[in-house]
Amino acid sequence: MTYIMQPLMASHRTDGPGAREKRASAPTDPWETVREYALHPGSGPPTLHTHPVHETVCVTEGVVGVLTVREGKAHQERVPAGSVFIIPAHVPHVVTNIGITAARFLTFQPLSPPMSDEP
């Protein structure tokens, strides 16, 4: 098996108060991404959003709350550090820091165009 290593482009963005995103992707395929988020207690994206592909999330520090909407019903989960979960494609969701300390998590998305703010 052959692996091709490509240099990663990194970018930084702030998603509202208390939230920071770092993104790394290969220059030839900017939508295959690994993102690191750092959230202050009580912070996270302001609205539900979706992705056209699944999203794998690994919580590395703190505790996050994951709100999803499936079949018209809201589901809230508490996810501590050391946990990995998958959000299926097209499922409206938001991840927020529900702990009293900083939370960090990584997201992995294959071939994903930008997220949509419409659930």
Image (cartoon, rainbow, N blue to C red):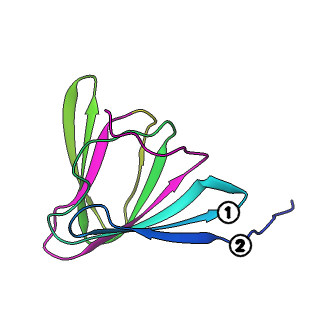
Residue 95 sits inside the magenta stretch: yes
Question: Image quadrant of residue 92?
Answer: top left
Q: Secondary structure at mark 2?
A: loop
Residue type for callout 1: Ala
Residue 117 sits inside the magenta stretch: yes
| Residue 116 picture location, percent across and down | 39, 39
Cβ atoms under marks 2 and 1 closer than 8 Å: yes
| Residue 9 picture location, percent across and down | 62, 70
Question: Callout 2: 10 Å neighbours few (<14), some, many (20+)?
Answer: few
Say whether disc 2 or disc 1 marks the residue closer to the N-terminus. Answer: 2
Which residue position is annotated with label 2? 7
From this viewpoint, which residue is outermost toward the right?
A: 2
Where residue 26 is drawn, which disc sits there? 1
Q: Quadrant of the C terminus?
A: top left
Is the residue 14 above or below the residue 79 in the image?
below
From this viewpoint, which residue is outermost toward the top?
A: 71
Which is more toward the observer, 73 or 35?
35
Left or right of 74: which side holds 111? right
Is the residue 103 above or below the residue 84 in the image?
below
Residue at image position (21%, 51%) is: 46
Where residue 89 is drawn, which disc sits there? none
Which is more toward the observer, 111 or 102?
111
Question: Image quadrant of residue 36?
Answer: bottom left
The magenta segment is: 91-119
Residue at image position (86%, 59%) is: 1
Question: Callout 1: 10 Å neighbours few (<14), some, many (20+)?
Answer: some
| Residue 103 picture location, percent across and down | 27, 71
Distance from disc 2 to disc 1, alpha carbons, whole Å, reads 6 Å
Left or right of 89: which side holds 28? right
| Residue 41 picture location, percent across and down | 16, 70
From this viewpoint, which residue is outermost toward the bottom?
A: 101
